[in-house]
Structures are given as C-alpha cells and as structure tokens.
Image (cartoon, helix red, strand yellow):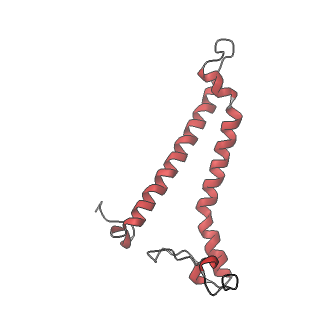
Amino acid sequence: MYSMPPYPYLATDYGTQLSLFTHHMWIGGFSYSWCCCACGIFMVRDYDPTTRYNDLLDRVLRHRDCNHITSQLGMYIFRIHSFGLYIHNDTMSALGRPQDMFSRYRNTITTRLRSMDTKHPCCSA
C-alpha cells in the first residue's frame, strides 16, 4: 500500500519522479531558510545590547531588516509559483487554446515556442 504512486504514470516516468523530488527539495530548502529567519526574529526578544556587543547574535540582529525582506520575497515567489499554474490554465482556457494548458493527464508538458516554429514569418528568409 505504501509503494503505490499517487499518479499512475509516476511509477514508470523517472523524469517526473526526479523533477518532483528536486522540486520538493527546493521547497524544503526555502522552508528551512524561513524557519531560520523566524528563529532570528525570536532571538530579538532575548537580545541585551549591554551584555552582547559584536558577537554572532549582535551581527545577525544588525542584518535583521535584510533577512526579513529576503524571507518576504521568498514567500511571495513561492505563492506565485504555486498559484501560477492555475492562472496559466485559466488564461489559456479563456483564450480558447486548450492545447497549451498544463494537464495532469499527460505524461509530458508540450509547449510550442514561436522561435522554433519554421512557419513563423520571422524565421522564413
């Protein structure tokens, strides 16, 4: 029961398995860095400038604005990444181009690039 894949083609499509693994490792890395930023914010409460001067905690807290902005940007990028597929599919559906939608029922995502299309006017000499 534990070895059954969530999607039928995942058991044989090793490229998809590798992509999913890499994708989730990146998500884990970002989550870990956000956890470290939250830990830095927690350390602000225990900071006493009279006893701690120019040690590691003092140097980290001097950069807290930069750390906070970086974690906020990371969260925004993560949210846009998660929601971007829905926006793309809704846009392609509204434009009447179902062949360009990302589908979970296909093994591969087919995209057509205009620069690779030899019938496009800019490519014909």
Q: Quadrant of residue 118?
A: bottom right
Direction from residue 26 to residue 76 in the image, left or right = right
Query: Which quarter of the image is occupied by the C terminus?
Result: bottom right
Residue extending furthest bottom?
119
Image position, residue 116 (x, y; %): 59, 78
Residue that appears at 66% across and 52% down: 76
Q: In the image shown, does 93 or 22 lie closer to the viewer? A: 22
Residue that appears at 60% across and 54% down: 78
Label tally: 0
Q: Is residue 24 above or below residue 89?
A: above
Image position, residue 75 (x, y; %): 63, 50
Q: Is residue 68 above or below residue 88?
A: above
Image position, residue 28 (x, y; %): 49, 48
Q: Is residue 50 above or below residue 103?
A: above
Residue that appears at 64% across and 79% down: 114
Residue that appears at 63% across and 32% down: 41
Q: In the image shown, does 122 or 67 lie closer to the viewer? A: 122
Q: Quadrant of residue 85?
A: bottom right
Residue extending furthest front?
125
Q: In the image shown, does 124 or 87 lie closer to the viewer? A: 124
Q: Quadrant of residue 99?
A: bottom right
Query: Which quarter of the image is occupied by the N terminus?
Result: bottom left
Image position, residue 66 (x, y; %): 69, 37
